[in-house]
Image (cartoon, helix red, strand yellow):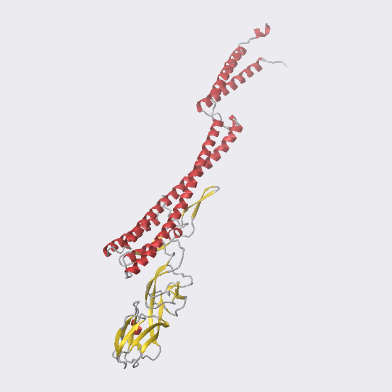
Amino acid sequence: MRVTSEFHYQQALQNIQSNYSKITTLQNQISSGKRVVQASDDPNAMSQIMANTVQDSRLTGDLTMIQDTTNKLQTGVDTLTQVQDLLSNVKTLALQANNTTTSDQTNKTIAVQINTAIDQLMKLSNQTLPDGSYLFGGTASTTAPFTASGTDSSGQTTGVAYNGTQQNSEVIVTQSVTSTTLLSGKDVFQSRSRSATGYVGATGATAGTGTDSAIGEGSLVIKHLQTTFAGTSGVTAGTSSSASDTVLGPAGANSVVINDTSGTGASGTVSLNGGPATAFTNANSDLKVTGPNGEVVYLNTTSISPGFNGSVSMTATGSMSVDGGATSVPIDFSGNQVVKNGTTGAITNVNSTNIRQAGTEQLHYTGTSDVFQTLIALRDTIANKQGLSATDRSDVLQQQLGEVDRSLNSVGNTIGSQSVQAQSLSTLKDQLTTLQLNLRQGTDNIQSTDTASAIVDLQKQMNLYQASLQIAVQINSMTLLNFLK
């Protein structure tokens, strides 16, 4: 087979084009710094680069979600820290109000400050994120979670309603990590941990053995109904007895001692439960006699048996109510009586065994007040809207301070939980950032040009290119004479 000059020419041209293409490629690699730009440059390397790019994109998405979630958690921590500071200040004010040396005017000022704290707490509980989502509404993130449910004649808030959900809102941060960002305000501001109901008063009523269902603060109104006397002393209930007696108790729990000093029943002394003696005559149809604990009985002494000297057993019946007297139950002086609120249906279990006089017991359903109820009740007690004695007011304040401490603990626990999540995300962010940097470095190593090596190769290709051109020139200069020689 003869090798023609045309074959030599085409071969030379192909070498020139190949060398020129390689030179162009090397020049582009050196100028751009990238060795692999398209699949044809290095199919295996491009496959790895594409895989790395997909993973890098996923890591970028994860890091963006981590940062967004961390910002939400930090907003929650910052807001709850403000709530914590607010409650701590309220506690300080309440302690000051519970000091016997604090004047009534100062207490009024403190009550105003507590009311301002209630308004501030309302704003904090309705905190929003930059996207407009409510932080403490749970999964109902587009509606203000807390609104005033009632106000008094002076415009002060008397109740707060929760409009959110009980379910926290969770976000998927990465394929294996979730985080709770939008919290249920029910858990944060209305957490409950019921314990024995507290009683403040002088009636003798205490907590029964059953579990109450009422929440917050309340009052147990104990009324006298009827007083009767055993024996033949001749003493009977006075004209005002039914309406004004405060003494209560089953048969034999109370007694009056009568001394007929006249011997004819015309005059003498009478005492209640060992209290101070009160003079009587047979003209007294409504004699007030007070016992040692302030209990009162009205007596009719117009028919005292002549010469009677001794103790007379009494029975004094009454009723109990937790809805202001709208409904009531008779007192049976037992270890547990169920008293139902006719309006709400809530149950209060009362130990009526030792009830000995009528009056009002301030009820504190321990562990059931949300933070708003606690502050509202605290404000009203400091202002003494209930008209309590100094001792009773102090006792009520002490119970309410316990609720403030419970709310502080609840908020503190939530801050801790959110902070732990934020810290975990921070650690994860550092790990993913390092992973992404290593991934990008690996991609760069695969894709980047080895400049020194590329320059050497470029010089080599330039030399080959020059040689190819010279050979082509020689081929083109050949004539018939070259073959004839």
Q: Quadrant of the N terminus?
A: top right
* Displayed quadrant of residue 108: bottom left
Name the quadrant containing residue 389. Answer: bottom left
In this rendering, the answer to whether 409 lies above or below 364 is: above
Residue 406 is situated, as x and y percent measured from the top left of the image, at: 42, 60
Residue 240 visible in this rendered orientation of the protein: no
Q: Name the residue nearer the viewer: 185 or 324.
A: 324
Quarter of the picture holding the C terminus: top right
In the rendered picture of this protein, how many numbered marks are placed on residues?
0
Q: Is residue 358 left or right of residue 437?
A: left
Q: Give the residue furthest to the right.
A: 1
Counting from the top left corner in percent of width and height, residue 13 is at 61, 19
Q: Residue at x 39, y 60 (%)?
A: 404
The residue located at (39%, 80%) in the rendering is 248
178 to 244, vertically: above or below: above
Q: Is residue 222 visible?
A: yes
Left or right, 336 with reference to 228: right
Residue 177 screen position, x and y as percent: 53, 48
Q: Nearer the viewer, residue 215 or 171?
A: 215
In the image, is residue 436 above or below residue 152? above
In the rendered image, residue 444, in percent from the top left (x then y), is placed at 53, 32
Q: Nearer the viewer, residue 105 or 34?
A: 105
Give whichever of 9, 222 is nearer the camera.
222
Q: Residue drawn 37% across and 64% down?
A: 398
